[in-house]
Every structure is written in C-alpha cells, then in structure tokens.
Image (tube, helix red, strand yellow):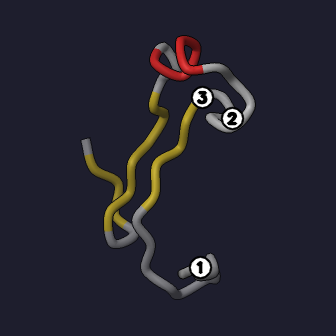
Amino acid sequence: MTGSITAGKRADFTVFARDPLAVGPEELARTAVVATLLDGVPVG
C-alpha cells in the first residue's frame, strides 16, 4: 500500500543522512539517522 505526504496529514518516517537505496549494505549500516517522526511529531 502506498500513501502520500500532504500538508495536514500525519506521518511516520525516518530521514537518513544518505539515500538508503543508493548505498551498499555496509554503507547503509553506517548511515546516520537525521530525524524520526511518529504521527508527525519528532522523537528521539
């Protein structure tokens, strides 16, 4: 199932320092998490 990101909608997502689809497995393990949002609210 896919959704959309639109102003006013709630969202759960993680922002990575690098594109996780463009790096190999070892590089992905070293990629920093910049932010995590749950229900649209920053956590951690």
Quarter of the image with the C terminus in it:
top left
Figure quadrant of residue 6: bottom right
Which one is in front, 13 or 21? 21
38 versus 8 height, above or below: above
* Residue at figure coordinates x 40%, y 69% from the top left: 40
Give the number of the mark in front: 2 or 3.
2
Q: Marks 2/3: CA distance? A: 7 Å
Q: Which numbered disc, 2 or 1, marks the residue that appears first in the sequence?
A: 1
Q: Residue at x 35, y 54 (%)?
A: 42
Measured along the vertical axis of the image, is residue 22 above or below residue 12?
A: above
Point out the residue furthest to the bottom here.
8
Q: Say which quadrant the N terminus sits in.
A: bottom right
Q: Which residue is identified by label 2?
A: 19
Nearer the observer, 44 or 19: 19
Question: Which amino acid type is shown beneath numbered disc 1?
Answer: Thr
Residue 7 is left or right of residue 32, and the answer is: right
Q: Give coordinates of residue 25: x percent, y percent.
A: 55, 20
| Vertical order, 38 against 14 (above or below) | below
Cα separation, mark 2 vs mark 1, equals 19 Å
Q: Where is residue 29 in the image (x, y as percent from the top left)?
A: 46, 18
- Mark closest to the chain's N terminus, 1 or 3: 1
Question: Residue placed at 45% from the left, 31% from the top?
Answer: 33
Q: Could you give the CA–CA distance between mark 1 and mark 3, rounded to whole angstroms?
A: 23 Å
Mark 3 lies on residue:
17
Amino acid under label 3?
Answer: Ala
Which residue position is annotated with label 1?
A: 2
Answer few, some or many: residues within 10 Å of disc 3's Cα (few below 14, many 20 plus, some between 14 and 19). Answer: few
Which residue of the protein is positioned furthest toward the right in this rendering? 22
Indicate the amino acid at tag 2: Asp
